[in-house]
Image (cartoon, coloured by chain):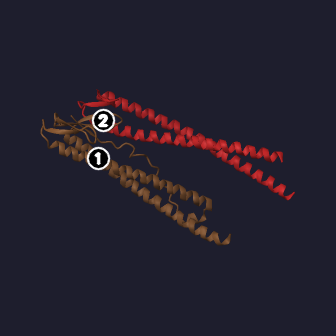
Amino acid sequence: MGSLRELQHELETKTNDLSKLQKEIAKNHQVRKKYTIQLGENELVLKELDMLNEDANVFKLIGPVLVKQDLAEANANVRKRIDYISAELKRLDGTIQDLEEKQNGKNESIMKLQQRIHTLQAGKAKA
Amino acid sequence: MAKESCEDRGAMAASKGGGAVVRVAEMEKMSLEHLKSLKEQSDLEVNLLQDSLNNIRTATARLEIASNALQDLSLRPQGKKMLVPLTASLYVPGTLEDADNVLVDVGTGYFIEKTMSEGRDYCERKINLLKSNFDQLIEVASKTKSVADEAGMVLQARLRQAGPVS
């Protein structure tokens, strides 16, 4: 009797853990999506900047003001941002993979627990 | 100086294509649960792709409006009097000071000074880019949709089969 209750308690905590993991994975996916969109946008901007003549006027919107910027500087800035976002994406991929592995492990252990509870209950019913 | 904003942020949201082509024969071998999850997943993907397609459509429409506005503006001489919209219902009088150059919003807060024709080129280029993306996406979407439909059909047939027995 006691062990059944213990098992059920364990199952409950594991399910809680699992739902926490799932929430975290969803959050990470959302962040990843945001970064992918930003990366695409930055790449488009870089393509535009690459097409310009050297004497073209480039402005950057800072708050409500447009500030004139050096083309080379703007180019370097965008490149830097693309590097940063790519690195961030790679890091996120790592964490997501990690979390998914953890999730799979949790799923398995929950299945095992459920099976044990099942067999225990079946045994009791017979007795 | 006229300001022309042509943004298409987010429209290019990367959408994972349903590359796995699962045919009916394979579906019939699947378990009921597996089939259900396949159906749900492909439905989700179809919705996502539909959203992306809609985004591209609105972005293209906006670029077309911008291109038309540029065309319109390029016909006006310098010093032309016009009403400038401050809000949707408030206009103030102004004069066109620079009839040659426009500022193009290329995204992430960067603006580039371009001539009228360059600005129109920019819009056309963006429209073409969006069109090619649109065509690619539509192909993926129709493929995913057919997978979802097939999964739904097999699932229903399976449920009907299982129904009378239980």
* Quadrant where the image shows the C terminus of chain A: bottom right
User: According to the image, label 2 marks what residue?
Assistant: A49
> How many residues crowd around disc 1 within 10 Å: few (fewer than 14), some, or many (20 or more)?
many
In the image, is B117 to the left or to the right of B20?
left
Q: Position of residue B122 (x, y in %)?
A: 26, 43
Query: In the image, is residue A11 above or below residue A73?
Result: below
Going by the numbered disc 2, the residue's amino acid type is Leu
Going by the numbered disc 1, the residue's amino acid type is Leu
Residue sitting nearer the eye, B90 or A49: B90
Residue sitting nearer the eye, B100 or A125: A125
In the image, is B11 to the left or to the right of B40?
left
Q: Colour of chain A?
A: red
Q: Position of residue B161 (x, y in %)?
A: 62, 71
Q: Which chain is brown?
A: B
Measured in 3D between alpha carbons, the distance from the residue under mark 2 to the one under mark 1, in whole angstroms, is 19 Å
Identify the mark at residue B78; answer none if there is no mark: none
Element under disc 2: helix
In the image, is B91 to the left or to the right of B47?
left
Asked where in the image residue B50 lies, by quadrant, the reply is bottom left
Query: In the image, is residue B50 above or below residue B119?
Result: below
Q: Position of residue A55 (x, y in %)?
A: 23, 30
Element under disc 1: helix
| Residue at horizontal 45 percent and vertical 36 percent from the top | A86
User: According to the image, label 1 marks what residue?
Assistant: B63
